[in-house]
Amino acid sequence: MDLGLTGKVAMVTGASRGLGRAMAHALADEGMCVSVCARTQRTLTEAVAALTQTGSAPRPAMGFAGDVTKAENAQRWVEETLKKFGGIDVLVNNAGAARPGALAEIPESAWQEQFDLNLFAPVRLARLCAPHMEKRGGGAIINIGSIYGRESGGPLTYNASKAALHSFTKMLAREYAPKNIRVNTIAPGSILTAGGNWERRFRDNPAFEKDFIGHEMPAGRLGRPEEVAYAVVMLASPRASWIMGASIPVDGAQGRSIL
């Protein structure tokens, strides 16, 4: 099936590893020009090299090293993407983090950092990118939330900021629908990534791995990055034209929310 993405331009945050890297590859596989952003230059350079060299022919891609919680970095990334590719069709707000701890243990500065990354950076990038999508007749903004933005679970700061992201998505979808800009959230469950948190925790405590999967994962395993990436491709495609304001779990039935 032709998903109608060939030649279109996608921007992906947090794309040097894990979920973001898988998303960038999946979008590039559909013929998109991909602009990826991450904070660490070394891992970003490796990710862009892998992205452009995959397949029989070089693929159009670029990288921008910067922290998108900083307004000037977000602005520069958008400007450099426009300069290289001439427009923006898809924005994937993937970058995110969790700060564990009880309420009394978490300083106010940590709350601000979590909301800056998990909520305010997507808000800023949506504001910057939407006018350019409108010029091209529409586009898609895909926010990567969490099952713990739909229900209780995870660290306090993570749950609160991801819940806010889901709420923002729903309201923004109603605002942008007349402009043919579709805004949706994907809510991953626990995903096993190379070098990621789950890999480290399971390596350090095999008994915890067995217990966690037995109690939390009905499918008997954690998800894979490419399984989330395929959902991103689906929502990026114009064929998903009537999916707006949705929160789509990609979790192997891990989540317990009925909505």
Image (cartoon, rainbow, N blue to C red):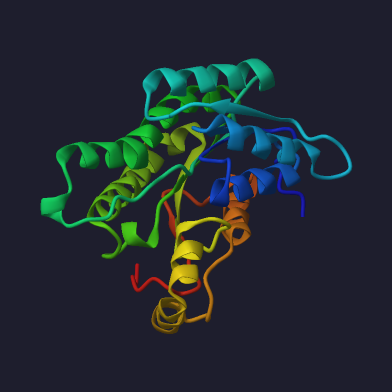
In the rendered view of the protein, which quadrant contains the N terminus?
A: bottom right
Of the pair 172 and 161, the residue shown nearer to us: 161
State the count of labels.
Answer: 0
Q: Is residue 108 left or right of residue 196?
A: left
Q: Residue at x 56, y 46 (%)?
A: 20
In the rendered image, the residue lying farthest to the front is 204
Residue 74 x %, y %: 45, 24
In the rendered image, the residue lying farthest to the right is 56
Q: Quadrant of residue 195?
A: bottom right
Q: Is residue 250 visible?
A: no
Q: Residue at x 43, y 29 (%)?
A: 68
Residue 175 x %, y %: 37, 36
Residue 69 x %, y %: 37, 30
Of the pair 62 and 135, the residue shown nearer to us: 62
Q: Residue at x 68, y 49 (%)?
A: 26
Picture layout, residue 223 above or below residue 243: below
Q: Is residue 86 visible?
A: yes
Q: Is residue 156 left or right of residue 246?
A: left
Picture layout, residue 115 above or below residue 65: below
Of the pair 176 and 169, the residue shown nearer to us: 169
Of the pair 141 and 73, the residue shown nearer to us: 73
Q: Residue at x 30, y 61 (%)?
A: 154
Picture layout, residue 36 above or below residue 77: below
Picture layout, residue 56 above or below residue 247: above
In the rendered view of the protein, which quadrant contains the C terminus?
A: bottom left
